[in-house]
Amino acid sequence: MRASTSLKTVTLAAVLIAAPLAAAYAAGHHKGALDATDPTDMAGPRVTSLIEQVQGVDEGINDAREANTISAAEAQQLHMRAAHISQAAEKVAASDHGRIPAAQYHDLLRRLDHVDQKLMVDTGSGFLMGDGADGGHYPNG
């Protein structure tokens, strides 16, 4: 049973790590004429990077939901939080000629990291605290 849990944890962690990279790769190779956006909307590298990271977190949420490690309600809440971050990034970029200032970019990344950490804790793959001397390890968060 323990080996199965460890395998699930390792698999989920690998998916969560690989998803943003896969999304970035796919985004660069699957642009079509219908995908064209106004250059002022998504011109900055910070905007593109942040949107791709949001997509990676969304894929992790979908994977966790499909693996039944989180409930539909948890998945919906996490998706909504990620969508709010994406919308905020797009709004800031639209008001600043397609760019996100460094301070706002770091704030949005921090917020997205909180969503990712919540996903990891909800799936049981979050960082654990304690050495097990009192009978177990406990999620950090």
Image (cartoon, rainbow, N blue to C red):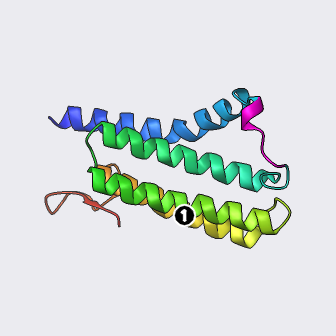
Q: Position of residue 71 (x, y in %)?
A: 26, 50
The correct choice, above or below, for 18 with respect to 79 in the image is above
Label 1's element?
A: helix
Q: Residues within 10 Å of mark 1 (few under 14, many from 20)?
A: some
Q: Is residue 87 left or right of residue 136?
A: right
Is residue 50 rendered magenta in the image?
no
Image point (57%, 62%), residue name: 85
The quadrant in which residue 118 appears is bottom left
Residue matched to label 1: 84
Q: Which residue extends farthest front?
A: 34
Question: Magenta residues?
Answer: 33-38
Picture quarter with the N terminus: top left
Residue 37 included in the magenta stretch of the image: yes
Whether residue 127 is visible: no
Q: Is residue 74 left or right of residue 104?
A: left
Looking at the rendered structure, the kind of residue marked 1 is His
Question: In the image, is residue 90 above or below residue 13?
Answer: below
Q: Nearer the viewer, residue 124 or 85?
A: 85
The quarter holding residue 67 reads top left
Identify the image quadrant of the C terminus: bottom left
| Foreground of the two, 61 or 117 | 61
Picture coordinates of residue 92, whole percent (x, y): 73, 67
Marks counted in the figure total 1
Question: Is 128 displayed left or right of 19 in the figure?
Answer: left
Q: Position of residue 76 (x, y in %)?
A: 37, 55
Rendered position, 36 above or below 111: above
Side of 39 where 93 appears, left or right: left
Q: Quadrant of residue 100?
A: bottom right
